[in-house]
Image: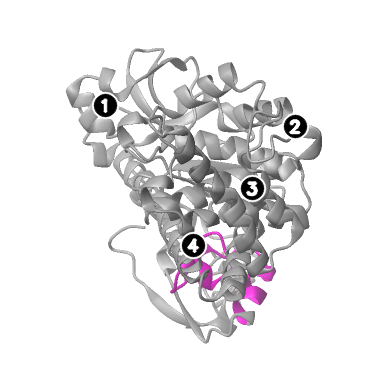
């Protein structure tokens, strides 16, 4: 949104299609994907009225009234006495309108600024939603011990919110967030939940199974809260007894799920999120025929996030490396159909990967269309363009340009590394592609 945009307020009862509105409150306070959007149908107006709001903020300059009966429609302009309301405009009026259109035609600089503003707004909206969700997750985790049933209600509300945003026919854009939000445990839980739900969507799971999947993914590590801090993450130097202690977090999680009165489907995800299809997992060494699809999804996604975001940041590998490693070493551990769908959805170069393009420029993958992942969106190092003014390039729309190879951030020239600024924590969120803000 441009800095000179005027923000006004209007009664909800007076809203019409085409108005660009801004909702106050966090992401959890309303059912829309964004807090700032243009009203496109009557269902959205009905939903706004059902929220009990009296007034909302809106931007006249960013609004489009071509589909409404507002005072800006040409049909509502006064007609001179005796004039034919259906008569065409006079030639002089046509010329005046043409001149005015030329005077107001956006310049290349105007288009760049508008595109950059949309890009920043889209990223900012995703980051706010991720931050709101991680705060909600932390409140849930903090309240489990004292009020397990209340914590379950909070977890169900957060999961339902995520599922509501995903269910539908629209394509989703998996966006890399520029900053990690919240504590590590909450960010990990939300990352696993979001990616698992996106996977559930690719398998066309029904809403009830999606809720079980998302809820189990969000709470999969709930048992770790009862372990000493240093045993909450498996380390190579652990003794056999320490490995066993770490593995008890699954049993502790199952006990916590009972206290929370979780549904069986979500509880099974907690119980089976470390099982492998070849029987090499824990705690029961179950093979695939004894585990659920949601559990197998979460087992894979949990491993991916831990490779990208380990307890020791110095051991992190890039998203591209994580996908390659799981493909090479995980064929016996993870359901082949789920592994294949995961790589197809995230792309060979998932968001967060550092790459070199076929024209030798360096770039950071910042987003992937979950339905068409082979041509991601990238932030390209342009030495003559300040990073804050750099537009995201959509490789799907640029002819003859692709990705040559993936790189470790440490292999980048110093100026490029500073420009692209790959983050030590890889966090993802999602949004409909039509509002993605990723531009060619």
**Nearer the observer, disc 1 or disc 4?**
4
Q: Which residue is mark 4?
A: 137
Q: Judge the density around disc 3: few (<14), some (14-19), many (≥20) Cα neighbours within 10 Å.
A: many
**Mark 1 vs mark 2: in front:** 2
Which quarter of the figure has residue 87? Answer: bottom right
Residue sitting at x 69%, y 55%: 266
Label 4 residue SS: helix
Read off the magenta span: 22-49
For the C terminus, give its image quadrant.
Answer: top left
- Side (left or right) of 382 relative to 12: left
Q: CA distance from mark 3 to mark 1?
A: 35 Å
Note whether residue 383 is visible: no
| Crowd tier of the residue under label 1, counting other residues whose Cα lies within 10 Å: few below 14, some 14–19, many 20 or above | some
Q: First in sequence, mark 3 or 1: give its number.
A: 3
Q: Nearer the viewer, mark 3 or mark 1?
A: 3
Q: Which mark is residue 287?
A: 2
SS label for mark 1: loop
Label 3 vs label 2: CA separation? 23 Å
């Amino acid at each position: 949104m441009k800095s000179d945009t005027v923000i006004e307020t209007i009664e909800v009862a007076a809203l019409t299609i085409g108005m660009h509105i801004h909702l106050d409150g966090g992401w959890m306070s309303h059912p829309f994907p964004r807090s700032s959007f243009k009203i496109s149908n009557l269902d959205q107006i009905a939903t706004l009225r059902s929220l009990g709001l009296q007034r909302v903020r809106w931007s006249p300059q960013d609004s489009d009234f071509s589909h409404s009966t507002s005072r800006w429609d040409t049909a509502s302009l006064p007609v001179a006495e005796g004039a034919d309301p259906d008569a065409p405009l006079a030639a002089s009026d046509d010329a005046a309108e043409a001149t005015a259109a030329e005077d107001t035609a956006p310049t290349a600089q105007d288009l760049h600024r508008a595109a950059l503003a949309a890009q920043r707004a889209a990223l900012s909206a995703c980051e706010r939603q991720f931050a709101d969700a991680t705060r909600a997750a932390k409140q849930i985790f903090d309240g489990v011990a004292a009020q397990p049933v209340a914590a379950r209600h909070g977890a169900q509300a957060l999961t339902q919110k995520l599922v509501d945003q995903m269910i539908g026919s629209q394509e989703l854009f998996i966006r890399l967030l520029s900053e990690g939000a919240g504590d590590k445990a909450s960010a990990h839980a939300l990352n696993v939940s979001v990616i698992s739900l996106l996977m559930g969507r690719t398998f066309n799971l029904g809403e009830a199974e999606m809720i079980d999947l998302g809820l189990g993914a969000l709470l999969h590590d709930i048992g770790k809260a009862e372990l000493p801090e240093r045993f909450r993450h498996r380390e190579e130097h652990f003794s056999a007894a320490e490995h066993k202690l770490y593995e008890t977090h699954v049993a502790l999680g199952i006990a916590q799920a009972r206290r929370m009165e979780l549904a069986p489907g979500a509880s099974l995800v907690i119980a089976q999120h470390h099982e492998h299809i070849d029987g090499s997992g824990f705690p029961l060494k179950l093979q695939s025929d004894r585990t659920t699809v949601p559990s197998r999804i979460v087992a894979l996604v949990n491993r991916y996030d831990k490779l990208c975001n380990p307890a020791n940041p110095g051991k992190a590998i890039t998203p591209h490396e994580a996908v390659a490693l799981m493909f090479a070493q995980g064929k016996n551990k993870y359901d082949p159909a789920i592994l294949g769908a995961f790589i197809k959805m995230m792309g060979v170069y998932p968001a967060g990967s550092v790459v070199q393009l076929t024209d030798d420029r360096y770039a950071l993958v910042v987003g992937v269309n979950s339905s068409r992942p082979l041509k991601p969106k990238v932030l390209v190092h342009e030495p003559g363009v300040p990073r804050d003014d750099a537009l995201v390039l959509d490789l799907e729309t640029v002819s003859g340009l692709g990705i040559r190879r993936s790189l470790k951030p440490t292999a980048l020239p110093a100026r490029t590394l500073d420009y692209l600024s790959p983050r030590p924590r890889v966090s993802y969120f999602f949004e409909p592609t039509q509002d993605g803000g990723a531009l060619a």
